[in-house]
Amino acid sequence: MIVQNSLLDSLEQTESLGLGLSLLPRFFTTAKLWPFIQTVLEQAPLRHLFTPGGRQMSVSMSNCGEYGWVSDKRGYRYTKVDPLSEKPWPMLPTALCTLAHQAAQQAGFKQFTPNACLINCYKVGARMSLHQDKDEADALRSDAQPIVSFSLGLPAIFLVGGLKRSDKTQHLILQDGDALIFGGPARLMFHGIRPLAAGEDTLLGAQRINLTFRRAYD
Ligand code: SIN
Ligand code: FE2
């Protein structure tokens, strides 16, 4: 898996970083997506969830789409209803759904139609420890749908490991407007985000927003 930034810097189009992992630098324009996300967050505000072990996450989260990802002492899972409002999660805006579909297509996954979008908000210092995305119904199947990730705002260091938590990690920088797609052999790779470095994005300020589009259930 080649994930050196010197290599990434010179790339303009889809770059396959290894089997099933692709980066599409500057794939979307944040100014066009941000209003949709703000509308979603007015209906389903960001909140700091607790891990099943009882630790509060440094990243705050919300969702849109038919399903939303949640975590609490009962475990990690997808729900159709926002536990805060007890109402369905806000709809996944069509513009976002279409862009996620196009990103997957460019990475070689033709049939991706997400029905869940997790919104992660990183303030300076927030991080995400190494984990696998495996709460989706098809995650362990060889024909699993990919995960499509969009980065907005401040840049972040994304860690990529292997299929075991103890595998060596490499890193790449995710910048504003980048799409990262992981599917196929990379679908269950361990990944995480280093503590967000201080900075100021012209549109989003001192934060990073990450959207991950998923097919939670068939
Ligand atoms: C995640 O793995 O859910 C988030 C990844 C990211 O913030 O880029
Ligand atoms: Fe993840």
Image (cartoon, rainbow, N blue to C red):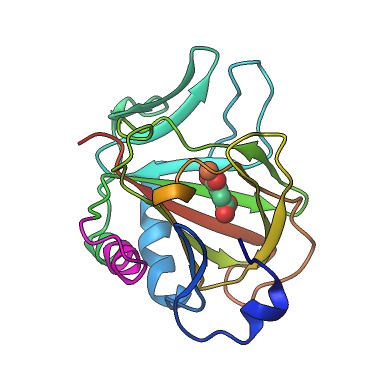
Q: Check the image and report above or below for 75 versus 166.
A: above
At which x and y percent is residue 187? 45, 46
Asked if residue 191 lies in the magenta stretch, the reply is no
Q: Is residue 45 visible?
A: no
At which x and y percent is residue 60? 58, 41
193 to the left or right of 93: right
At which x and y percent is residue 111? 20, 56
Asked if residue 107 lies in the magenta stretch, the reply is yes
Quarter where residue 107 is shown: bottom left
Q: Residue, x 74% and y 56% (percent of image)?
A: 196
Q: Residue, x 39% and y 69% (percent of image)?
A: 33
Q: Is residue 218 visible?
A: yes
Most prominent secondary structure in the magenta stretch?
A: helix
37 to the left or right of 205: left
Q: Identify which residue, 139 or 97, lies in the foreground.
A: 139
Q: Which residues are magenta?
A: 99-111
All told, the count of numbered labels is: 0
Q: Residue, x 58% and y 38% (percent of image)?
A: 163
At which x and y percent is residue 68? 36, 36
Quarter where residue 205 is shown: bottom right
Q: Residue, x 79% and y 63% (percent of image)?
A: 198
Q: Identify which residue, 190 or 201, lies in the foreground.
A: 190
Residue farthest along the top direction in this orientation:
74
200 to the left or right of 83: right
Q: Quadrant of the C terminus?
A: top left
Q: Quadrant of the N terminus?
A: bottom right
